[in-house]
Image (tube, rainbow, N blue to C red):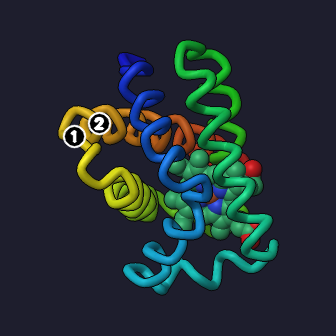
Amino acid sequence: MALNPELIRESLGVVVEREAAITPHFYERLFARYPQVRPLFSRNDPERQQKMLQESIVAVVDHLEEPEWLAETLGNMGMQHVDYGVTAEMYPWVAECLLDTLADIAADQWSDDYRAAWEEALGAIAGLMLAGAAKREAATS
Ligand code: HEM
């Protein structure tokens, strides 16, 4: 994966310095723009769900130089997401809301380079999760 770990880490640092809890803002935006996904989030309470997502973002960012770890972890995560009712069309919604949340929090410290690096990374993450999802769907059909 030709990613730009330096820019991703630098931008995440800028964001987290301003606001440690990114995910509540993300969910607020996601549910406002795409209310149809809200019923999917019923297995865990919002606080636990937010913590899991934030931890997974940090874990992925920690492993950006490890393609095997990424493929395996994200493939498994994609498989689980099929069971949550997540479909391929939803990945761009999540990417868009996460990007806008990061940009909003970073405010005047955000840059086009940060956006490009995140767009690329989120596209790659979605690709690996969807590869896992496809395996899951093939196994159950
Ligand atoms: C950037 C890609 C994504 C990442 C890193 C991510 C991460 C996670 C993590 C870590 C969990 C906790 C359980 C688990 O490990 O499976 C989770 C659960 C979940 N995710 Fe995602 N996810 C992503 C994309 C999506 C998308 C596109 C949707 C669609 C709306 C979605 C909906 C859900 C739902 C419904 C759950 C279960 C919620 C619950 O437990 O109540 N995720 N996700």
Q: Which residue is mark 1?
A: 111
**Res 141 seen here:** no
Circle 1 Cα neighbour tier, 10 Å, few/some/many (<14 / 14–19 / ≥20): few
Pointer 2: what residue? 114
User: Secondary structure beneath disc 2?
Assistant: helix
Residue at image point 61% right, 22% down: 63
Looking at the rendered structure, the secondary structure element under dot 1 is: loop
Q: What quarter of the picture does the C terminus occupy?
A: bottom right
Tell me which amino acid carries mark 2.
Tyr
Look at the numbered discs 1 and 2 and tell me whether their residues touch, using CB distance below 8 Å.
Answer: yes
Residue 89 at x, y percent in the picture: 40, 63
Which residue occupies 36% across, 38% down?
118
The picture places residue 46, in percent across and down from the top left corner, at 73, 74
The reply, left or right, for residue 29 in relation to residue 120 is right
Q: What residue is shown at x 63% (from left), y 16% (from top)?
A: 68
Q: Position of residue 12 (x, y in %)?
A: 47, 38
Total marks in image: 2
The CA span between labels 1 and 2 is: 5 Å
Query: Residue 127: which quarter of the image?
Result: top left
Q: Residue at x 42, y 34 (%)?
A: 124
Three-letter code for the amino acid on which mark 1 is drawn: Ser
Is residue 114 shown left or right of residue 139? left
- Give above or below for 51 relative to 60: below
Q: Quadrant of ligand 1?
A: bottom right
In the rendering, at what x and y percent does residue 21 appear? 61, 58
Label 2 crowding class (10 Å Cα cut-off): few <14, some 14-19, many 20+?
Answer: many
- Quadrant of the drawing holding the N terminus: top left
Splitting the image into 4 quarters, where does residue 116 fall?
top left
Whether residue 73 is visible here, answered yes or no, is yes
Above/below status of 41 relative to 2: below
Q: Nearer the viewer, residue 14 or 72?
A: 14
Q: Which mark is residue 88?
A: none
